[in-house]
Amino acid sequence: MTQAGLSREDGDSFLKKLHEQPHQPISEWLRAPAHVQYEAFRMSDPPTQRPASRAEFQSLLERFKVSDERIELRDNFGYGVKEAENGDRLILIWQAHTEYYNYQFWHVPSSPASLLTFGPLTFPAAPVSLTPLGSVVCRLDIVLKTGALPSREEVRGQLPGPVLYGSRIFNEQAAVVTSFTPDNHGRERYWVSVGPLQGDHSRLKDIVDAVVRIETYYHLLLMQKPLFSAAIDQVYKFEQVHLQQREIITGHIGHANPETLQRWLNSLTQDLLKTNRMAGKLHFELSASIPYDKIVHATLGSLAEQPTASYRPISDYVLGGITGVAEGYQQLLRRIDTLRGGFEGIIAIIRTRIDLIVESQNLTLLQSVDKTTKSQVILQHTVEGLSVIVIAYYLAGLAGYVFKGLYEVGWLGNANVASAIFVPVAIGLAFAVTTFSKKYLHKKLAGEQPATNADKQEE
């Protein structure tokens, strides 16, 4: 098969996977009344715990002896359907997300007249038990019933907590009531009256998905509040320290010596490292707050919530708990970035000051070297002049002995006159010898230097 054909098949497979709806086949197994329990867990190590949660779900399916024909299992989503002898149905759903994974357990009784209540699932099989692979985000207990919403007194007896919240959703076809208060099992209870389904059982999954999505991201937002509160105090202390350091450094940097500058630089570098560590942790923990906040608002909007008599709107509680939270997280991250930029700026100023001091010292050293070099040149010229005189003196002395010998032999009429005449000649010879020697040495050194460089390049 050609490369173009393979690419086309890969593209078709990707588009098919992109547009498929993995939840859709579950709808054919659903009906009301139903009892749903939901659990979500935040993973501390998603790359490791995500496949581990999938393996846990597989073991759960094996424990309930779910047949392969009623199992759908993918990388991040899976479900299985188990039917008991009395006709009751248990639907197990697992889904892994970027930061958390969750389970939904649906108990769908065989008889529409079954009286479902909150609490443990009454499906006639082994109880559902899980080993969390992370911290618990939320646990929900949802009862879905057909017909109209019962009286407030009846609902009041089923839901713990001082205040009840309820709204009509999806064009007033369904009603949801909750107290947002965990029961003895640590689960928040939801009473859902689905109204007339008219054969559209997929709306049951839509209602449950909307409820669990709001609760999950609501809790994910608020789970970071302890970290946020602790970080606020820590950032405040860093800001105070930085302001004090900046005032001291600004007032004394003009006349600070290198030792003081180095001490400031070490202290600020340590503070910058601490700030970077804190910023990295907070960015990792809080950066998703804005998307989570948008998911909660978008899901509330999709419910088309309408107020119900005798109940406070559900959105009042949810929005009251998260309003300003995500923006507060982002404001903290901006404060940390500003603090980090302040540390980096003052460190850059100190380093510039140190560089200027070093350059000034280097300039002074170069001036001293230049002065020393000039003195050496003058001294060298002086020594060379003295060398000419000394050489001429010795040449004249030696010539004097020669002239005296010639005078004694009779070959020369006056030795003193000859010595006197030879003095300028001796000076000229001394100057010639000195000049020739200096040129010879320069030429020799200039010839040795290229040869040395060539040897190094060859090595």
Image: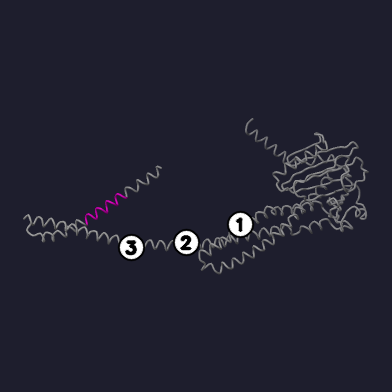
Among the two numbered marks 3 and 1 on one chain, the one whose residue lies closer to the N terminus: 1
> Is residue 423 or residue 415 the one in the foreground?
415
How many numbered tags mark residues here?
Answer: 3
Residue with the most extreme top position: 1
Residue 93, given in percent of the width and then of the height, sits at 80, 42
The answer to whether residue 441 is magenta is yes
* Residue 375, disc: 3
Which segment did they paint magenta?
A: 431-445
Seen in the image, is 122 located left or right of residue 286? right
Residue 163, given in percent of the width and then of the height, sits at 86, 58
What quarter of the picture does the C terminus occupy? top left
What amino acid is at disc 2? Val
* Residue 358, disc: 2
What amino acid is at disc 1? Leu
In what element is the residue under mark 2? helix
Among the two numbered marks 1 and 2 on one chain, the one whose residue lies closer to the N terminus: 1
Q: Which residue is mark 1?
A: 273
**Does the residue at mark 3 contact the one at mark 1 (Cβ under 8 Å)?**
no
Among the two numbered marks 2 and 3 on one chain, the one whose residue lies closer to the N terminus: 2
Residue 126, given in percent of the width and then of the height, sits at 85, 40
Give neighbour class at mark 3: few <14, some 14-19, many 20+ (Cα, 10 Å): few
Quarter of the image where one finds residue 270: bottom right
Residue 209, given in percent of the width and then of the height, sits at 80, 47
What amino acid is at disc 3? Ser
Q: CA distance from mark 3 to mark 1?
A: 51 Å
Q: CA distance from mark 2 to mark 3?
A: 26 Å
In what element is the residue under mark 3? helix
- Residue for point 90% across, 40% down: 110
In what element is the residue under mark 1? helix
